[in-house]
Amino acid sequence: MSTNPNDWWREAVVYQVYPRSYADSNGDGVGDLPGITSRVPYLRRLGVDAVWLSPFYPSALADGGYDVDDHRDVDPRIGTLEQFDELVAALHGAGIKLVVDIVPNHSSDRHAWFREALAAGPGSPERERYVFRRGGGADGELPPSDWTAAFGGPAWEPVGDGDWYLHLFAPEQPDWNWAHPDVRADHLRTLRFWADRGVDGFRIDVAHALTKDLTEPLPSKAELAGLLDGSHPLFDRDEVHEVYAQWRELFDRYDPPRTAVAEAWVPAHRRARYASPEGLGQAFNFDLLKADFDAAAFREVVTDNLRFAEEAGSSSTWVLSNHDVVRHASRYALPPGTDENAWLLSEGKDPVPDADGGLRRARAATAFILALPGSTYLYQGEELGLAEVADLSPAALQDPTWRRSGGEQKGRDGCRVPIPWTAAGPSHGFGSGGAHLPQPSWFADVAVDRQDGVEGSTLEFYRQALAARRRLRTGDDLTWLPSPEGVVTFTRPGGWTVLTNFSHPGVELPAGRVVLCSGPLRGNLVPQDTTVWLEDEPA
Ligand code: GLC
């Protein structure tokens, strides 16, 4: 295990806060920075090493804040720069690091440079900072290509003078032109701005999309399919690593060096360069988000990713939930293969989720990943065992996915509902007013104050797991032990044994002293959907 304090990120437990939905200090229904600061004692007690803040920058919220008007400021609804400094001080005072989200693929359409680009007209240098192209047809009335955006609809938006601009996400999120020196310089300035304010690390949004090859003629959508080797004009191009090499130089000028983690949706074998020490240093592996709760599937994902991380000279990352996916307590409550979007469209009724089983499996999976080498990313509310809020009415939805897909994709609001702190009171203790996304009545049963100090509650289970992990974590090694079908067992150096029973009727408890159980044992048997951690008995 590294004893260099600069390597804190290698085995960190990083807790993701979605600022608008965490804690609202002024009762306006929107979570804010003072709200988060007020919860630092809770985070300390939970035992996390770092907090990752999703965007809190000025934004029209066309995409939950990932449409950034000004990357070097705080949205007035969320706070001020002074309040940001107070949050940094409170977290650091509690021994917790801070990671902020950087959104470099696009700005918002309200960004000063985009407004200038629109005003300056076709062919102007201002337009070169973004990706403008002439439309086809006699008067430029046709899009430059047939590409579609991630949230649905065309990836090009006309501006009324024959030019169209590229947006891989919502139309309110114009893509930057990363071939432009202004764009590069401005992002370096942004990184310095936050690093100088004491931020410890950065989470890089869609890190694989920045650099693009838009040589004409543009290929058709059909021609783009299957280009996974660096030849895709929009994603995962080799040149993107020149950007990150430059960022790494900047990060390493700080003491301690600033860290970064890439959100790069690339095939596993292409992840290493993002995670290399010359690049961002770490990259998310979302493989478990896509895997069924299945022994063989989990073991394969772990084996592969430990190898990839080693090849990259990094440590692996483990994630079960975040602000973009159905919460894992709900995913595991649905039969394998369920179409999650269809389930959300049925308001969570078809199929009927097995809520108890889902929570059991979620806790078992969490205990499994927390015992792995590498760092773990937790998403706010999962420590309460929160399920997805699947029955949000269409009128309440904020995610652009819903509108852009013409109501075919329900989107990600169900995991972004403000979390319940108290069973009673307005917005369950989120704030003194309402909540910007409606909270369901069952939030009362899972609120923090209902679980605090209650033996066996999910909150106490997370606290216990993080405390034990802090004591036991032991570097990069893991050894698989032979196990019956449906069971995975491994040991870590220092006498730490971990067993997860995914699907066996009941497997015998290995030798050792039990330090953590994700659910009750049955005498000497570990029941299905349960993880147990054991420590060697002192000789
Ligand atoms: C990332 C974010 C997601 C956002 C998208 C566009 O995938 O996690 O929430 O919508 O980038 O910025």
Image (cartoon, rainbow, N blue to C red):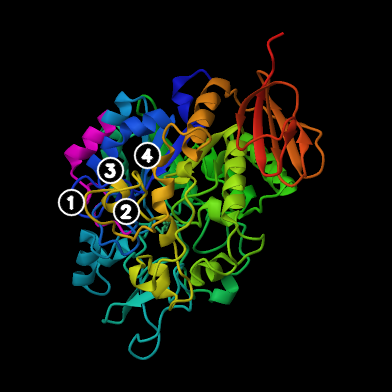
* Residue at which label 2 appears: 183
The Cα–Cα distance between marks 3 and 4, rounded to whole angstroms, is 42 Å
What secondary structure is marked by label 3?
helix
Marks 3 and 4: CB-CB under 8 Å?
no
Residue type of the residue flagged with mark 1: Pro
Circle 1 SS class? loop
Amino acid of disc 2: Val
Nearer to the camera, 181 or 277: 277
Sequence-wise, the earlier of marks 3 and 4 is 3
> Which amino acid, mark 4?
Asp
Q: Residue at x 43, y 48 (%)?
A: 445
Where residue 386 appears, as percent x and y from the top left, is: 47, 49
Q: Where is residue 16 shown, x and y percent of the image? A: 41, 43
Report the span colored magenta: 67-89
* Above-or-below relation of 51 to 166: above
Q: Earlier in the sequence, mark 1 or mark 3?
A: 1
Real-space Cα separation, disc 1 to disc 2, in angstroms: 25 Å
Residue beneath disc 1: 76
Sort mark 4 into few (<14), some (14-19) or many (20+) by Cα contacts within 10 Å: some
Which label sits in the foreground, 3 or 4? 4
Give the residue at mark 4.
Answer: 449
Tag 2, which secondary structure? Answer: helix
Residue extending farthest to the bottom is 138
- Tell me which residue sits at (55%, 63%) in the image: 232
State yes or no: discs 1 and 2 in contact (Cβ < 8 Å).
no
Residue on which disc 3 sits: 189
**Callout 4–callout 2 Cβ contact below 8 Å:** no
Residue that sits furthest to the top in the current view: 539
Residue 1: in sight, yes or no? no
Compared with 417, 451 (above or below) is above
Crowd around label 3: few <14 · some 14–19 · many ≥20 (10 Å): some
Residue 207 falls inside the magenta stretch = no
